[in-house]
Amino acid sequence: MTLRRFREGDRVRFRPQSNLQFSLNIATDEVGTVVWVEQHPPQTGPNYRVSVAFPGRISVERVFEFEFELVEAAPGE
């Protein structure tokens, strides 16, 4: 199994194990769109950061990818 890096346009939500969405007042099932992905290789070792926009809400800037799970791949994937 190959791990897939998030890409711009992917639709994601916070993982159930994440506590970050509570501090941002974002519902566990709320879906956002990846708008930025840290280039490879990331500055932080094997973990990379992403920015996610939630419609009509805030953008979550430069959060580690492991806080999110993929809901739907970007169009054209």
Image (cartoon, rainbow, N blue to C red):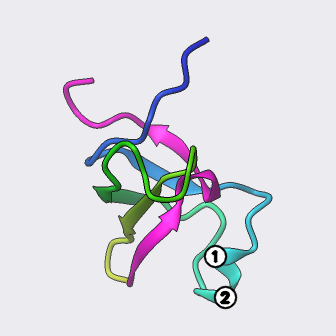
Tell me which residue sits at (37%, 34%) in the image. 73
Against 53, is 56 above or below?
below
Q: Which residues are magenta?
A: 58-77
SS state under label 2 = helix
Question: In the rendered structure, are the residues bearing label 2 and label 1 in contact, judged by CB atoms less than 8 Å apart?
Answer: yes
Image quarter where the N terminus lies is top right
Q: Residue at x 63, y 59 (%)?
A: 67
Residue ID for mark 1: 21
**53 with respect to 2 (left or right):** left
Residue 5 position, x and y percent, is 44, 36
Q: List the single residue furthest toward the right.
A: 17
Left or right relative to 41: residue 3: right
* Residue 64 placement, left or right of 41: right
Q: Amino acid at mark 1?
A: Gln
Amino acid at dot 2? Ser
Residue at the disc numbered 2: 23
